[in-house]
Amino acid sequence: MDNVSVTSLLTLLGLNCTVEQKVTLFSLTLLCYLIIWILNIVLIVTIIVDKSLHEPMYIFLCNLCINGLYGTSGFYPKFLMDLLSPSHVISYAGCLLQSFVIYSSTGCDLSILAVMAYDRYVAICRPLVYHSVMTKQRVSLLVFFSWLLPLYCMFMNTITISQSKLCGSHIHKLYCSNWLIGKIACSATTANSAVVYFNIAFYASHSYFIAWSYMYLIRMCLKPQTNRSKFMQTCVPHLLSLFTYSCAVFLELMYMRFGPRDVSQNLQNFMAIQFLIFPPILNPLIYGLKLTKIRNRILGVIHDRGKDQKCVDKAAQKR
């Protein structure tokens, strides 16, 4: 306890590269962040503008894309600044905030995917009562709680970890996480341990519910009288999105806790950020390409703008 001090600045140790490498990495990171914003904004705006897409499945998808922008905002701006700066420091409060944004977004992702699994279960397994079950009020409540509960869980985790006294100031990662803040704390508090176990149980129940929903969906689709095209059209994108999310988050969590430290720093960094790259990019691509109504709407807008541009060019030529 003699080493305890009031720590106001923490140092992120994950970034060790030359100036030339930083320039290249900055360009690639900025390009990746712009792609994430463009893809997700296109899907969000398409769903908001087109009233025919104001259905539960598309509303949940819109929130999934919004959450993708929310989560990546906790990492990319700070990382881009670090690439331009010789020192990679962050305030203790900023570290807690960054961890809160990134990991609450991860929790919101799973909650929204669970709600989407429930929506597909009702649509395919109980189609006659779908509209009476998925009313506007119920959809609003599902969206509200899919945001509120993960934010609350992460908030409680952040509050309890912030009460710990720190015996170090080095975070061995490109960004902050409560797990690593806990590792440099002098001792773990009982409250924080309890919150961590509660959060694990809470998200495990999400996984169980998703598995339960798709067990019934697959069983229903094996019946000959079932409309399998509906399952292929709407459930396959959800399964792909769920698979991408699960693999990315599982690899990051397992490597953060149990991964060897004798591998290269570049591989460690990639394992740490891949869940902030692939799901935010792949989700809008998967749904935008697979869901017919969204794909047709986006292609229709592009086609109409192409026609308008041709008309403008013809008018200019006549003049």
Image (cartoon, grey):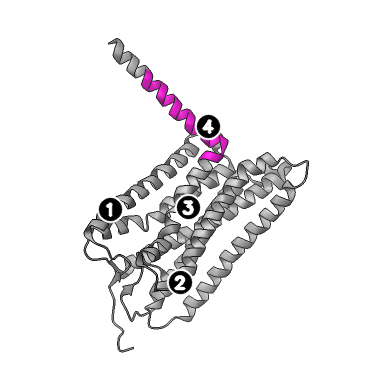
Q: Disc 4, disc 3: CB below 8 Å?
A: no
Question: Residue 317 is drawn in which quadrant?
Answer: top left
Q: Residues within 10 Å of mark 1 (few under 14, many from 20)?
A: few
Q: What element carries label 1?
A: helix
Q: Quick check: is 131 in the magenta stretch?
A: no
**214 w.r.t. 135: above or below:** below
Residue 204 in the image: x percent, y percent?
59, 66
1 relative to 289 in the view: left or right: left
What residue is shown with label 2? 259
What residue is shown with label 4? 296
Which badge, 1 or 4, comes first in the chain's sequence?
1
Residue 236 in the image: x percent, y percent?
61, 46
Task: Name the kind of residue labelled 1 in the image.
Answer: Thr
What residue is shown with label 1? 24
What residue is shown with label 3? 279
Q: How crowded is mark 3: few (under 14 residues within 10 Å), some or many (20 or more)?
A: many
138 relative to 65 in the view: left or right: right
Q: Which quarter of the rendering shows the C terminus?
A: top left
Q: Residue furthest top?
A: 318
Which badge, 4 or 3, comes first in the chain's sequence?
3
Which badge, 4 or 2, comes first in the chain's sequence?
2
Q: Residue furthest bottom?
A: 2
Q: Distance between the residues labelled 1 and 4?
A: 37 Å
Which badge, 3 or 1, comes first in the chain's sequence?
1
Task: State which region is magenta.
Answer: 289-310
208 relative to 64 in the view: left or right: right
